[in-house]
Each structure stands twice: as C-alpha cells, then as structure tokens.
C-alpha cells in the first residue's frame, strides 16, 4: 500500500477480509450449523473452543496493560468483565461451561484443557503472543473479527436449536449475551483503528492483523476436522469421544 485509504475504504477492506477468510466459510462450521455434525463432533468443538474462550480475558488483559490512556482502559476492561464476570458463577466463560456441561463433559476436565488438540493450543497461544508483541494498533485490530460474529452467532443458535435434540437455549446461553456485546466491542475497535492508523503502512498492518486473527480461528477448525472427521487422526493425549 502506497496511498492512504479513506475511513470508508479501510472499513470496506476489513469487511472483505471477513467475507473471504472468516471461519463462517469453513466446512466444519457449515456442517455444525446445518445439523450435519454428530454429537461427538459438537462435543469436541465445544471442548476445544473452551480454550479460546478462556484465553480471551488473558488476551484482553495483555492489551489493557499496554494502554496509557485511562479512558481507553476503562472502555477495554469491560471485555474482561464480560468473560470473567463480576463474581463466581458469572460471565462468558461460565456460560460456555454450561454448554460443555450439557454435552456431558466433566467440568474439571474441560477447565484443565488436558484433552484439547495441540493445534488448538498453538493457535490460541499464538494469538495471545501476537497482542503482546505487536503494536497496540495491531492488537486492537486483531479483535475485529467481532464485526462478523453477530451473524455467525445468529446462524449458530438457530441452526443448532433446530437440528440437535441435545442442544437447548440454556446450553447456548453464551451466545445470547454476545449478540449485544460483540457489536459494541467491534464498533469501538473499528473507530479506534480508523482514527489511529495514520499512514498507509499502519493501515496495511491493521488489515494484516485481522487476516492473522481469521487464520487463528480457521486453524482451530482445520485441526478439529483433521482429528475428528477426515482423516480422523486424533493426536496422543487428545480427547477420545466415548472415553469421557
């Protein structure tokens, strides 16, 4: 990039990345929403996704620690509260555990992350390292997958409720809250990157950060498909359906 994009052009470029690379395009997710996954496949998705959910407040705390502006910190810390809750038994992580509870997984086992795929751990840890090591602008831009999450959440909830008799509204409680939280967070981050990307190089870094985050999400589903669908090679130590 050699020329500055307008704010509208930058937003359009970000949304194009989502259209092409967000994990709503992944075959595993299409099967998940379409009712084509077995209960075992839904279970391993929820188990592995827990690690991502549990590390979101860790990621956000790393970003928060780099902010010098108190107003910016006050706005960003809400993300941590949303996931950790204000008290025991509250927050997004607790609501995700209601999903894994409902799928028959032992809570202590889920929290231990003992049975997740190595690729899940590598991908999520790479995301945490990214926000620690890159510029604050890039770290905030990497969260912009939230621009696309309301649609995937709506599709997920309606599709899973319609197609799986082992899923109900209580087990999907996590997603109801995110329908209001994600747009709020995305709007804040989008306004920030538009305002703070002052050069073509910074705008290119914003686009690359979102691409990286899409790759993190995609890699997790690739790992699930490889281990539990085709060719079905479950790594040593990873969760074995039917063995819980």
Image: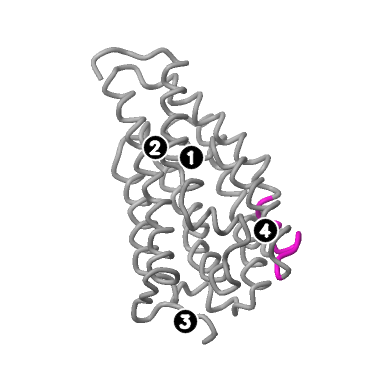
Residue drawn at (43%, 65%) of the image: 224
Q: Report, in whole angstroms, how far the alpha carbon at label 2 lies from the one at label 4.
A: 27 Å
**What is the number of the mark on residue 185?**
none
Q: Do the residues labelled 2 and 1 touch (CB within 8 Å)?
A: yes
104 to 19, vertically: above or below: below
Identify the residue under disc 2: 210
Mark 3 or 4 closer to N-term?
A: 4
Q: Nearer the viewer, mark 1 or mark 4?
A: 4
Quadrant containing the N terminus in the rendered view: top left
Mark 3 or 1 closer to N-term?
A: 1
Identify the residue under disc 1: 145
Mark 2 or 3 closer to N-term?
A: 2
Q: Which of marks 3 and 4 is in front?
A: 4
Q: Report, in whole angstroms, how far the alpha carbon at label 3 lies from the one at label 1.
A: 30 Å
Q: Are marks 1 and 4 in contact (CB under 8 Å)?
A: no
16 to 101, vertically: above or below: above
Q: Nearer the viewer, residue 89 or 69?
A: 89
Identify the residue under disc 3: 240
Q: Report, in whole angstroms, how far the alpha carbon at label 2 lies from the one at label 3.
A: 33 Å
Q: Which of 24 and 236 is in front in this view?
A: 24
Q: Does the magenta stretch include residue 170?
A: yes
Mark 2 or 1 closer to N-term?
A: 1
Q: Considering the numbered disc 1 on the image, is that residue within a helix, a strand or a loop? A: helix
Identify the residue under disc 4: 160
Q: Which of 113 and 99 is in front in this view?
A: 99
């Amino acid at each position: 990039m050699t020329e500055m994009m307008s704010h509208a052009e930058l937003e359009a470029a970000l949304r194009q990345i989502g259209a092409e690379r967000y994990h709503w395009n992944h075959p595993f997710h299409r099967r998940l929403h379409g009712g084509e996954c077995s209960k075992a496949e839904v279970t391993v998705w929820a188990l592995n996704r827990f690690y991502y959910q549990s590390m979101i407040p860790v990621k956000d705390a790393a970003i928060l620690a780099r902010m010098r502006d108190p107003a910016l910190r006050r706005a960003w810390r809400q993300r941590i509260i949303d996931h950790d809750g204000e008290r025991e038994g509250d927050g997004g992580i607790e609501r995700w555990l209601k999903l894994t509870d409902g799928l028959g997984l032992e809570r202590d086992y889920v929290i231990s992350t003992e049975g997740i795929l190595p690729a899940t751990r590598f991908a999520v840890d790479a995301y945490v390292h990214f926000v620690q090591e890159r510029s604050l602008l890039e770290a905030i831009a990497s969260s912009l997958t939230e621009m696309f999450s309301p649609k995937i959440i709506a599709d997920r909830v309606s599709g899973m409720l319609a197609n799986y008799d082992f899923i109900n509204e209580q087990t999907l409680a996590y997603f109801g809250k995110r329908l209001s939280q994600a747009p709020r967070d995305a709007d804040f981050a989008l306004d920030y990157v538009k305002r703070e990307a002052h050069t073509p190089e910074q705008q290119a870094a914003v686009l690359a950060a979102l691409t990286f985050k899409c790759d993190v999400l995609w890699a997790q589903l690739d790992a699930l498909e490889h281990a539990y669908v085709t060719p079905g090679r479950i790594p040593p130590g990873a969760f074995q359906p039917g063995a819980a």
